[in-house]
Image (cartoon, rainbow, N blue to C red):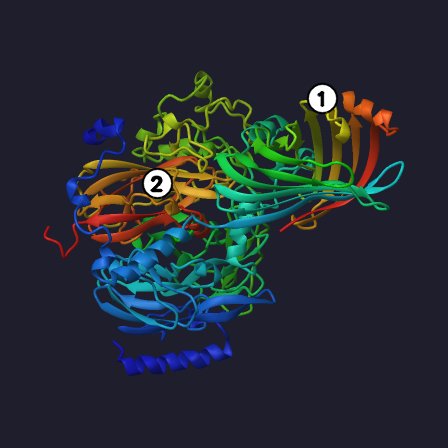
Amino acid sequence: MLSRRALLARGAALGSAAALSPMLPAWARSGTRGVPPTLPTLSGRDIALEIGHMPFTVGGRTGRAIAVNGTVPAPLLRLREGETFRIAVTNTLDEVASIHWHGFLIPFQMDGVPGVSFPGIRPHETFVYELPIKQSGTYWYHSHSGLQEQVGLYGPIIIDPATPDPVAYDREHVLVLSDWSFMAPERIITQLKQEQGHFNRNNLTAAGLFSDDPAQQMSLEDRVKWAKMRMDPTDISDVTGAIYTYLINGHGPAENWTGLFRPGERVRLRVINSSAMTVFHVRIPGLRMTVVNADGENVRPVPVDEFQISVAETYDVIVQPTENRAFTIVAEAVDRSGTGRATLAPRLGMSAPVPPLRSRPLLGMDDMGMAGMGSMGSGGMSGMDHGSMAGGSMAGMGHAAKARGGAMKGGGSMAGMGHGAMPGGGSMGSMNMDMDMRNPANVPPNVDVGVGVDMVAPEPQDRTGNPGLGLENAGHKVLTYRDLIALKPNPDRRRPSRTLEINLTGNMYRFMWSFDGRKFSDGVEPIRFARNERVRVTMVNNSMMQHPMHIHGHFMELVNGHPGHHPLKHTINVLPGSKVTFDITANNPGDWAFHCHLLLHMHAGMFNVVTVRPLDREPA
Amino acid sequence: MGGIEAQREMPNPPPPPAALSGPAHAADLVYNPSDMATAREELRAEQGDLRAYRVLIDRLETQFQEGGNGYKWDAQAWYGSDINKLWLKSEGNGTYRGRVEEGDLQVLWSRAISPYFDLQAGGRVNFGPGPQRTDAVIALQALMPYSYNVEASLFLSNKGELRSRLEAEYDLLITQRLILQPRVELNLSAQNIRELGVGAGLSTVEAGLRLRYEFIPEFAPYVGIEYERKVGNTAGYARASGEDVGSFKYLVGLRSWF
């Protein structure tokens, strides 16, 4: 390992390189040959990071960013499992800052959440994190203060395993996906409070009734039904390409970040969604990708053509381009309002066609928390659920079949819908809109169904077999959560001793977001776990937005039909109107944040603290 | 999973006693507890307690009509949290040759009472030539099923008169930027108020159509038409003083907000 002096020397070398290609570390610079294990990036046991303001330029326009060591994204940190790292973070801002190590299993006081794990890093002070590393894989770090993450304070981490990596590859590239706006994030959330759907530029229109645009294909009758509910089937993302430029490694689509390969090589792509608000659909036309790692944990290889990566998730994929040509990496925003674009090429300067944006999906019955069948949007009635069930992963389905507490009026007509009675083409013709969409009897009594709750899902389904909004009919293999099987057996084979239902709640009209109907600012009771307790937690999404749910300091075992090999995730995306179950062993004592990783949802109240007791210092 | 299934009736049983042991805040054992308390309060306020505002100029228009062109404004502004807001409303009209004919300003406290309803209470001052009233106001502002906006206000004047105003409008998107807005306004009174020219029952009806183009959502010029008619005793008072009871207007205006 490096001495501190050697590290400083490297820092200086990096600094001069940065002068040649301002604002970007070597790995993120276009034309990079990749991240060989010996690349002089920030590594070693002592690492110094400095948070500060910086101008950031994309698409010929310059805005104000918060950067680490003068770069957006922040420097790549290369750590090693089994070692302890000291990372000194200096805050040159005039406000409190912080860095949270996303997905790390470390002592709570090093987790980096002001007000939960530590007081934060005050202006012009330095905080030294001490991180004992007990895991390996692809991770990332970001600010947990205010809205700093939206303006650039995020960076990738690779932790090399202590034992030989089961994933074989010749070269690796890091792909940091993010969303950049020239509008200040405080202004963005204010505008969301001012007007619902403000950034949506792809609404249903009257003209659309007479057009061939697939994004407009909804009958007048169904449109009226949606309007009656005061819901918007086109409200896919709160913040869209109307103000976002989607970045890959800090490059906009026009800058076209390029990573190099030699034909025939196995290339490992470490994809990290560092966005504030954007769920991406990633594909490389002409290349099959094999998913080998999710959220830092190895999974049994899954060959796919495309995968959804929600905010804060990571996926590692292997590609093996054999042709001597360029390939476009497409990271399309879920609402199809824009795309991140990069290139894999044998030589710099080569590029491949960029496919046009696909059609914006429409929300359907599943997204309202009704027992529909697949998503109605975009004509997507291909019977996806049945398809993936035939694949053999049934376990998650047991609960899914249960309706919630009999809140259905005229439930008889639902039966037909659950079994393929829907015509194709995205019609909701047989949809029963008389179902009570806000019945407090459908949630546990601790849920406050008040102003902040505009919907209670009547019968939320387990949709871990769904590839993501608008991907049901992609025409090729798209990853689903049910495809993820942990490579290693799950460490704790005990049966959970308790269940906990957490309801994800919101009011789209007022842009209020919460758990169980209460915003964090309302002064909520923490979620309490006993140390080493094993709990089965079900997250029920009572909204028509998706929520990437993240717990600090622990992995969640996603209950997806592979008992004993449930994938371990730090972030689980809960599709609109659906529910997801995970098992957790609360083995990391302390206080931990638990929140939706859509930054503005968290900022609107979708946050809580998880406590694990007793602590180390107490008598057990 | 038998044990789990058995507990399904009660999805959230209490945690075991050990979960409730130890300090309330783990970080207080490591860091200065008063620093942590400050940081905790900042965190609480940061995650959900946002104060927002909006200034909406819903209608700022020139009205072309027989007998002299006029102008009209209708604006609102609010500031506050998700639940409680200070809400200002003002509307009025005048002719380009004369002064303001009539105008009002309402100052209201607004409270969200359900996902789509705000209950508002406060006062209204009226201004313009002739006798004026000051009113106590109770109003309901709502997004109704079928996604149209409704504002219903009840005014109790300093002379004990009760009046009411009902407004409804709907945004029909023709394209992403071209929006047709039908709008209806009814004014009612519980009694004849001769000096204000207001008769008991339904007093005036306004029906308008505005077609706006949102260059950006915050800036949308429009053209429109509007028909306004006095009815009942109100119409009688108008005729008696030689005024028209109905008028048809062409509108050119701007809708804007920030």
Task: Say which amino acid is labelled 1.
Answer: Ala
- Using the rendered image, report if marks 2 and 1 lie on a common chain: no
A528 left or right of A261? left
Residue A602 at what x, y percent from top left? Answer: 41, 49
Is there any visible trace of residue B51 in the rendered image? yes
A417 left or right of A161? right
Q: Disc 2 vs disc 1: Cβ atoms closer than 8 Å?
A: no
Kind of element beneath mark 2: helix
Question: Of B20 and A616, which appears nearest the observer?
Answer: B20
Task: Say which amino acid is labelled 2.
Answer: Arg
Q: Which residue is mark 1?
A: B200
Q: Given the current orientation, which residue lies at the most extreme front position?
A: B159
Q: Which residue is mark 2?
A: A482
Residue A2 at what x, y percent from top left? Answer: 27, 78
Residue at 10% across, 52% down: A619
Q: CA distance from mark 2 to mark 1?
A: 68 Å
Residue A351 at what x, y percent from top left? Answer: 56, 63
Residue A80 at what x, y percent from top left? Answer: 26, 66
B163 left or right of A417? right
Which of the 4 image quadrants contains residue A169? Answer: bottom left
The answer to whether B23 is drawn above or below residue A443 in the figure is below
Question: Of A35 and A409, which appears nearest the observer?
Answer: A409
Looking at the rendered structure, which numbered label has been put on residue A464? Answer: none
